[in-house]
């Protein structure tokens, strides 16, 4: 079977590397012959190149220590018969039939070429597709594997077939790159069978969500897979204390989300599509999904016509009458690197979540990003927000949010900067590297 592989620069715009003064680059032309120079790491996550998840942030920064083989998403639920899933299936098929041949000239320029030649995927929504890690050119590339499989298979035969399909696509790639007994990382419980089939040296499970409560997941299948994965993993990383408490204490470590301090602290030009009529703006970016409290937002926006309410992200659910309000704008998705041009220039950042088990266990990436921008944050109550009482104004209902916004309008100013160096992705990756070296 043809191996669907591409190489892509794992990169982020960051301050100069604080860990080492050595160059971070290694020409891709040497990659095939460099087995053993760095340990091999196989990663099962979401599709590489979308809005960067915590896994993408961490793995990009670990790539100086590991040869990374990134397997695009194998899914958390079976597809359904509607337009979005149909579009997703077509994307997967197009990605699977593409095969990139990077230019092997030893210069490192093949990384950009490989990115540009990729078919069926888009790098327009990612900050991980440039050529810099910690402010330097990087030729440390994750090798992207784009498999076709059966998402979230149910039943023994379906699992066996899905596992066989994955092996037929992943094993030839690992053989080609002389990978034996890799360290395997998965952020998806549904990868439990294929993780074991790769004869790993160790298995790491990174849990960033409460899958038992996460919308859009086959809960019964994923819960069973997670139980088996927890038994097999040598190290479990949890993004929040609530998640960590689910797992065996002896092999679980807390690994909260970090923040790209440089991106969100460096002054950005104001986005041209932000309202500019002198009225204050309350803004939110992220997935516009069922976990937002749209009824609360409608009540608040209706009561405060002299405020603009701006939402950035894909609409994943019915937002109700909120969309019809004249002071509410839905701007659609933006690239991650563009977000500071919005969040640095609106007056208040919003975290208007519903009170659900998923939210109570979550540690949203945007929380630290909002804090880095220095704008006041108004949030409904959940544990992660409670950890920042100086920066986050907690509200419990629409009346609270209305009063808090009115009070903030009287003294709107950029908050004093908080030292986030210990919360940076660089600090998280350093801690993570030490943990991986110890297992």
Image: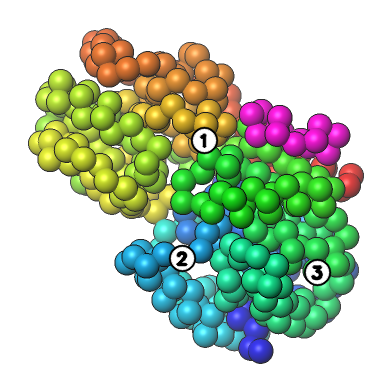
Q: Which mark is residue 390?
A: none
The structure residue drawn at horizontal position 65% and vertical position 58%, both measured from the top left corner, is 190
Q: Answer yes or no: is residue 391 visible.
A: yes
Dividing the picture into quadrants, the one containing residue 22 is: bottom right
The residue that disc 3 covers is 198
The residues tagged by marks 1 and 3 sit, at their Cα atoms, a distance apart of 31 Å
Tell me the quarter of the image containing the N terminus: bottom right
Name the front one of labels 1 and 3: 1
Name the front one of labels 1 and 2: 2
Name the front one of labels 2 and 3: 2
Of the pair 346 and 40, the residue shown nearer to us = 40
Of the pair 404 and 347, the residue shown nearer to us = 404
**Does 19 appear in magenta?**
no
Q: Residues within 10 Å of mark 2 (few under 14, many from 20)?
A: some
The residue that disc 1 covers is 358
Q: Which mark is residue 79?
A: 2
Q: Position of 265 compared to 238: left or right?
A: left
| Range drawn in magenta | 241-254
Q: Are marks 1 and 3 in contact (CB under 8 Å)?
A: no
Q: Position of 260 compared to 24: left or right?
A: left
Give the residue at the far bottom of this rendering.
Answer: 1
The residues tagged by marks 1 and 2 sit, at their Cα atoms, a distance apart of 22 Å
Under tag 2, what secondary structure? Answer: loop
The structure residue drawn at horizontal position 48% and vertical position 74%, both measured from the top left corner, is 92
- Residue 156 placement (x, y as % from top left): 70, 67
- Residue 83 placement (x, y as % from top left): 32, 67
- Residue 175 placement (x, y as % from top left): 80, 80
Q: Residues within 10 Å of mark 3 (few under 14, many from 20)?
A: some
* First reached walking from the N terminus: tag 1 or tag 3: 3
Under tag 1, what secondary structure? Answer: helix
The structure residue drawn at horizontal position 37% and vertical position 67%, both measured from the top left corner, is 81
């Amino acid at each position: 079977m043809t191996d669907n592989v591409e190489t892509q620069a794992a990169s982020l715009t960051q301050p100069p590397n604080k860990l080492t003064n050595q160059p971070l680059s290694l020409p891709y032309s040497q990659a095939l012959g460099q087995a053993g120079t760095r340990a091999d790491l196989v990663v099962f996550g979401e599709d590489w190149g979308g809005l960067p998840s915590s896994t993408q942030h961490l793995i990009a920064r670990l790539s100086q220590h590991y040869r990374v083989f990134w397997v695009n998403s194998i899914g958390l639920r079976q597809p359904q018969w509607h337009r979005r899933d149909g579009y997703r299936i077509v994307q997967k098929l197009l990605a699977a039939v593409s095969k990139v041949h990077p230019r092997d000239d030893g210069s490192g320029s093949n990384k950009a070429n490989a990115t540009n030649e990729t078919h069926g995927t888009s790098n327009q929504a990612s900050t991980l597709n440039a050529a810099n890690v910690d402010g330097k050119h990087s030729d440390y590339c994750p090798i992207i594997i784009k498999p076709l499989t059966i998402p979230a298979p149910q039943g023994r035969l379906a699992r066996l077939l899905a596992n066989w399909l994955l092996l037929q696509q992943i094993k030839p790639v690992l053989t080609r790159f002389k990978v034996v007994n890799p360290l395997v990382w998965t952020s998806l419980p549904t990868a439990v069978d294929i993780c074991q089939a790769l004869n790993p040296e160790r298995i790491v499970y990174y849990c960033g969500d409460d899958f038992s409560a996460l919308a859009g997941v086959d809960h019964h299948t994923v819960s069973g897979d997670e139980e088996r994965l927890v038994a097999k993993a040598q190290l479990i990383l949890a993004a929040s204390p609530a998640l960590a408490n689910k797992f065996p204490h002896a092999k679980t470590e807390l690994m909260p989300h970090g923040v790209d301090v440089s991106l969100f602290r460096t002054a950005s030009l104001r986005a041209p599509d932000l309202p500019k009529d002198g009225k204050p703006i309350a803004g939110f970016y992220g997935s516009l999904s069922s976990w937002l409290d749209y009824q609360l937002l409608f009540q608040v926006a209706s009561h405060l016509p002299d405020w603009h309410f701006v939402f950035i992200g894909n609409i994943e659910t019915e937002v109700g009458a909120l969309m019809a309000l004249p002071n509410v704008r839905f701007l659609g998705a933006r690239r991650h690197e563009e977000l500071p041009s919005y969040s640095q220039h609106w007056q208040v950042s919003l975290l208007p979540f519903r009170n659900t088990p998923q939210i109570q266990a979550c540690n949203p990436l945007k929380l630290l990003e909002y804090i880095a921008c220095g704008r006041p944050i108004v949030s409904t109550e959940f544990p992660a927000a409670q950890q920042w009482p100086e920066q986050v104004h907690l509200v419990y209902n629409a009346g609270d949010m209305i009063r808090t916004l009115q009070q903030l309008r009287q003294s709107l100013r950029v908050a004093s900067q908080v030292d986030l160096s210990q919360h940076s992705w660089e600090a998280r990756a350093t801690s993570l590297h030490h943990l991986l070296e110890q297992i």
